Image (cartoon, grey):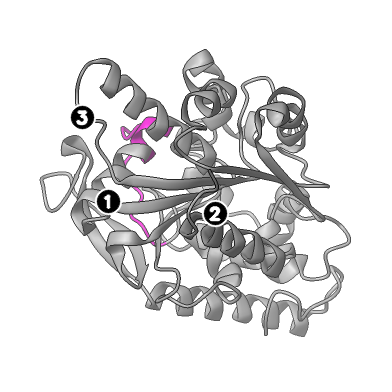
């Protein structure tokens, strides 16, 4: 059973049980294809330490030139499972997937751990070093756009200090349904704006809620026309319940506020203009995205005249569920253009 196999939100008990079983089976298959590697956050390095956590990592093909598929909030790497089915094989396009701390099959730390864009970027950079990634395409979905922006900004800052930029060669930057401009976030008030104001240990509260309550609050991630929204919702719900990820909902929900606090430093316009002569960019958005629908409009208004490629797809925010084939085709085409020599 796949995310398109149940076509109605009004399901009987047997169909609901089947949807739940299908979601758990798909998650189990996804996580079985990866491993849980030790990461030491205080050292910002992979490997064992006093406060090491286990991080889920999935690799396909040669890690040295793998495209880095950065996850969305709140489901993590499992959101890429449907897209992977339509992507070129590992030989043609090596791939690297991960769950950030607190997401999916990664450990959720105790209450004093501080989640942030910088913390997630530290993990990605540590993983690149550990696996010997020499060249990569940043493929960012949802809030991982901020991780991509943070990494690009760090490289500029290091160069300005006369230090090596650090990190692998960036072949290209592909961002879909992510935050780009601090004035472009449009999250519905009952989602991340409310979540980030809840007490740090709200996980048990969410864990005790039914799937119906979860969909009442989070169902806006999918368009109402999407026939597979119940199975897709089950996948996200079960991924959050896997390793106390429910507490991640409130503890990491401040990423939009984090972006706004960064001001000009993580402004996509400034970063694009600084990098566009070195790195190709493709920015995409969904027509009915309830969270970041203004971002592509702002990108088009501010940067299209500078050559930024902008693409729109139909459906809601969770394009990874609603249009995985179209999203995969965009990513594959983008990677193919990076492999060809640039025109004079």
Check whether the beta carbons of the residues at disc 2 and disc 1 lie within 8 A of each other. no
Where's residue 203, x and y in %? 49, 46
Q: CA distance from mark 3 to mark 1?
A: 16 Å
Residue position marked by numbered label 3 in the rendering: 164
Marker disc for residue 207 = 2
Name the quarter where the N terminus is drawn.
bottom right
Mark 3 residue crowding within 10 angstroms, few (<14) / some (14–19) / many (20+): few
Describe the element under mark 1 as helix, strand or loop.
Answer: helix
In this rendering, is residue 41 above or below 237?
above
In this rendering, is residue 253 above or below 156?
below
Instruction: Point out the stretch of residues depicted in magenta.
Output: 105-120
Where's residue 139, x and y in %? 51, 51
Residue at 60% in and 71% down: 82
- Foreground disc of the pair 3, 1: 3
In this rendering, is residue 181 above or below 284?
above
Q: Is residue 265 magenta?
A: no
- Foreground disc of the pair 2, 3: 3
- Foreground disc of the pair 2, 1: 1
Q: Residue furthest front?
A: 344
Residue at 37% in and 31% down: 118
Check whether the beta carbons of the residues at disc 3 and disc 1 lie within 8 A of each other. no
Residue at 45% in and 33% down: 200
- Nearer to me, 90 or 169: 169
């Amino acid at each position: 059973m796949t995310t398109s196999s149940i076509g109605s939100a009004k399901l009987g008990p047997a169909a609901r049980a089947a949807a739940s079983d299908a979601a758990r089976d798909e998650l189990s298959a996804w996580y079985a294809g990866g491993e849980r590697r030790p990461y030491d956050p205080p050292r910002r390095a992979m490997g064992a330490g006093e406060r090491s956590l286990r991080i889920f990592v999935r690799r396909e093909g040669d890690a040295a030139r793998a495209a880095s598929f950065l996850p969305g909030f709140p489901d993590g790497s499992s959101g890429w499972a449907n897209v992977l089915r339509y992507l070129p094989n590992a030989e043609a396009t090596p791939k690297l997937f991960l769950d950030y701390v607190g997401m999916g099959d990664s450990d959720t730390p105790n209450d004093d751990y501080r989640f942030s864009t910088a913390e997630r970027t530290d993990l990605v950079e540590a993983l690149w070093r550990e696996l010997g990634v020499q060249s990569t395409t940043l493929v960012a979905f949802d809030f991982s756009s901020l991780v991509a922006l943070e990494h690009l900004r760090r490289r500029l800052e290091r160069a300005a200090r006369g230090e090596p930029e650090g990190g692998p060669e960036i072949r290209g930057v592909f961002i879909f349904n992510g935050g780009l401009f601090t004035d472009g976030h449009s999250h519905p008030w009952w989602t991340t704006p409310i979540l980030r104001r809840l007490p740090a240990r709200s996980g048990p509260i969410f864990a005790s809620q039914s799937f119906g309550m979860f969909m009442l609050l989070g169902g806006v991630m999918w368009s109402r026309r999407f026939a597979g929204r119940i199975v897709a919702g089950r996948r996200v719900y079960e991924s959050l319940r896997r390793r106390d990820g429910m507490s991640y909902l409130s503890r990491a929900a401040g990423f939009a506020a984090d972006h706004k606090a960064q001001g000009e430093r993580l402004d996509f316009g400034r970063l694009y203009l600084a990098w566009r002569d070195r790195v190709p960019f493709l920015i995409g958005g969904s027509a009915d995205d309830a969270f970041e629908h203004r971002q592509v409009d702002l990108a088009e208004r501010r940067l299209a005249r500078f050559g930024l490629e902008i693409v729109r797809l139909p459906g809601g925010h969770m394009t990874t569920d609603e249009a995985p084939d179209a999203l995969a085709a965009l990513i594959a085409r983008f990677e193919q253009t990076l492999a060809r020599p640039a025109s004079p």
